[in-house]
Image (cartoon, helix red, strand yellow):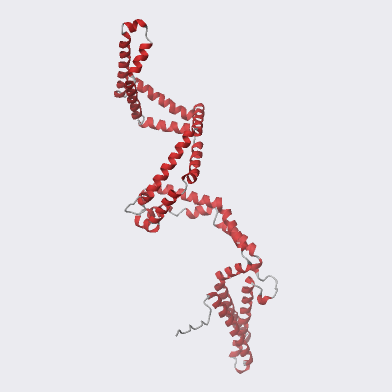
Amino acid sequence: MHRRRPVPLFPADPGRRLRLLATALLVVMAVAFVCARHFADRHPALGYAAAFAEAAMVGGLADWFAVTALFRRPLGLPIPHTAIIPANKDRIADSMAGFLRANFLTHQVVARRLHRLDVASLIGGYLANPGRTTTRIGDSVTHLLADILATLDPDKIGRPAKALLSRQIERIDLAPLLGQVLAGMIADGRHLPVIDSLLRRAGALLEANEDMLRAMIRDRTSTLMRWTRLDDRLASALLDALYALLAEMLVDQGHPLRRKIDETLERLAHDLVDDPALGARVAMMKADALRNPAFAAWLDALWERSRLGLIALLRAPAVGGMGELGTGLAGFGRALGEDAALRAMVNRFARRSLAGLASRHGDDIVRTVSETVRRWDAGTVTRRIESAVGRDLQFIRINGTVVGGLVGLALHALERFV
């Protein structure tokens, strides 16, 4: 047999409990006032009690009216300037949205609040702990991402990425970039192995086509030279001279022809940066290349290799969890902890990004807030605001009753003794 749980004296809602307490206190003051006035002639102290109870009733009733008038009409009477919140719901929604926009979602406010926030250290500390990364993110997430990439149509998910890459390539001013890269290679001497490789390939090409070159020389000589076989000696001499020239250029870094090549490359790097005509020709060549079907095929192959590589990376097991991706993230986290310049760059990027989001989407956010509150009916707005501040409002009623009683008591004492 189950015992019935006792019904609590007050409801579980603390706001409603305080409302009942404030009302009960007002009723107690009313009963005390009636009793004190009825027996006032029996003892002088009852006059003080009556004055306290009377003033407490006035203060409690006044605060009850003020609190009730915020949310509804007291006793259902159509008293002007009551039910303030339901009657002004839309204006309150607009005011809330404007307050949020002006004080929280401006570029200056967001940037100022993020100025002291070290986002990079937080990210670095989070990523550098492989156990924490695995616990919070989990291998299941990486496998889920891998399954999504493997099952979705590669063309549909790759089309936006390829279109974005094409647009970015179109926006690049290629000539100055090539000029700067070439100038940097020449300054560091990184072009020298390229020249050596070209010279070796030239030698190999010459050796592979020696018979054809001999035939070309023989066909262009006179009949007398062919009859005296001077054409073979001429072809051998020319080929030997070419082989010797290539060998000397490979061995001697200061060879005059190599210096000429360096000067030509330096002039080309300068013209790529400073010559508008050459820049226009490079831009035209880039545009032609982008329109070439071979470029589209290269993009398709690049996307497919990237997709398959990412799937393999996500599915690759590793001790730290999350496969090779987790290892890479942990390394990036350690780099953030050790490299002050990298931390500063990440923090600067985070501040700019978040402040930019606030500037770009602040109006949309406050519009969403305003429209959401506007869609609420008056009863919903009243209940939500009252549930948020109801306890404090009932304390106002209780304090009004007590303070009113004390003021009445002081006035009665002043009347008796002055």
Whether residue 52 is visible to the viewer of this picture, yes or no, is no
Q: Give left or right: position of 324 versus 384.
A: left
**Which one is nearer the viewer's eye here, 86 or 59?**
86
Task: Tell me residue 340's x, y (percent).
Answer: 38, 48
**Which one is nearer the viewer's eye here, 164 or 233?**
233
Q: Residue furthest top?
A: 224
Q: Quadrant of residue 250?
A: top left
Task: Tell me residue 102's x, y (percent).
Answer: 57, 56
Quarter of the image with the N terminus is bottom left
Quarter of the image with the C terminus is bottom right
Task: Tell me residue 247's x, y (percent).
Answer: 30, 21
Q: Residue furthest bottom?
A: 42
Residue at point 51%, 51% (across, down): 355
Task: Tell me residue 261's x, y (percent).
Answer: 38, 23
Q: How many marks?
A: 0
Residue at point 50%, 44% (across, down): 160
Q: Is residue 195 above or below residue 44?
A: above
Q: Give left or right: position of 230 versus 56.
A: left
Q: Quadrant of residue 65?
A: bottom right
Whether residue 26 is visible to the viewer of this picture, yes or no, is yes
